Amino acid sequence: MTESPPIHRSLWRLYEHLAMVIGLGTLAILCLTWLPFAAVLHPLLPRPLGQRLGRRMIMVGFRHYLRVLSLLCACRFDLSELDSLRHERGLIIAANHPSLLDAVLLVSCLPNAVCVMKASLMDNLLFGAAARLARYVRNDGAHRLVKRGCLSLAEGSQVVLFPEGSRTRDFPMDPLGPTLGLMAKRSRAPVQTVLLEFSTPYLGKAWPLWRAPCLPLRCKARLGQRFNPPDDHLAFTRLLDDHLRTELAASRA
């Protein structure tokens, strides 16, 4: 195989750095554009109208963001399998968590999604106002998280939760916590698994925010098994862990 000349490799690395700036800059601009509107509308609109508008705007904003990444940053997204979930109600979506882009990929396809977010992100200048308007679930303790998640599911929302609790450190997946199983047990909501696969671990736990990606970046969302609400949440957590690991190992092979 003929190796690319050094000048070509240098130009491509320059493009990868430019793509990183475009990607981060576009996300910041979208968040800052919506921030004042979300902050003003949150106390003014009735909760049902506010959360519906907030979730729809986040979905549209993330779709626009992924379109920019596709057109300008050599990113390729295959999210077609998520389309079948768009209109389902009262569903927990459980996905592995390899990258900071994971929630963006999922929410861009789901108009009634509720993300479980760290308390620090809910208070973040860029994301906080939009997340509060959309009535995302604040993760400030397992008991409160489960209670709020069950309320959202009872309203017919789709709760997006990463059962690893944080981005993956030890690939293919870190051990799962019991919170998702407990929420499924108490809400009696089914659990749909989603496998997120990336060509490189871009924006993973070991990939600093300001490190340029290796392009082209390919991302695919694949539907896994759907589970009925469990009676034993600890046994369910082990079952979910086995399923996700088996599917991720198969895709890597």
Image: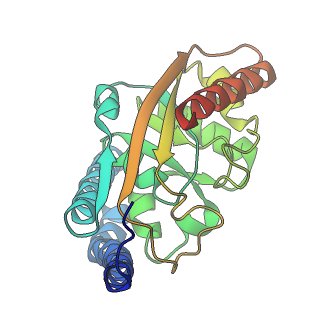
**Residue name at image x 67 percent, y 21 percent:** 185
Rendered-image quadrant of the C terminus: top right
Location of residue 186 by image quarter:
top right
- Answer whether residue 36 is visible to the viewer in this image: yes
Colouring scheme, one of rainbow, by chain, secondary structure, one colour: rainbow
**Residue name at image x 67 percent, y 25 percent:** 240
Residue closer to the observer: 134 or 216: 216
**Residue extending furthest right?**
234
- Answer whether residue 135 is visible to the viewer in this image: no
Residue 35 is situated, as x and y percent measured from the top left of the image, at: 34, 73
Q: With respect to residue 46, does 253 lie above or below?
A: above
Location of residue 123 by image quarter:
bottom right
**Residue name at image x 63 percent, y 55 percent:** 167
Q: How many marks?
A: 0
Residue 32 is situated, as x and y percent measured from the top left of the image, at: 32, 78
Residue 117 is situated, as x and y percent measured from the top left of the image, at: 56, 55
Q: Is residue 173 left or right of residue 37?
A: right
Rendered-image quadrant of the N terminus: bottom left
**Residue extending furthest front?**
1
Residue 225 is situated, as x and y percent measured from the top left of the image, at: 52, 19
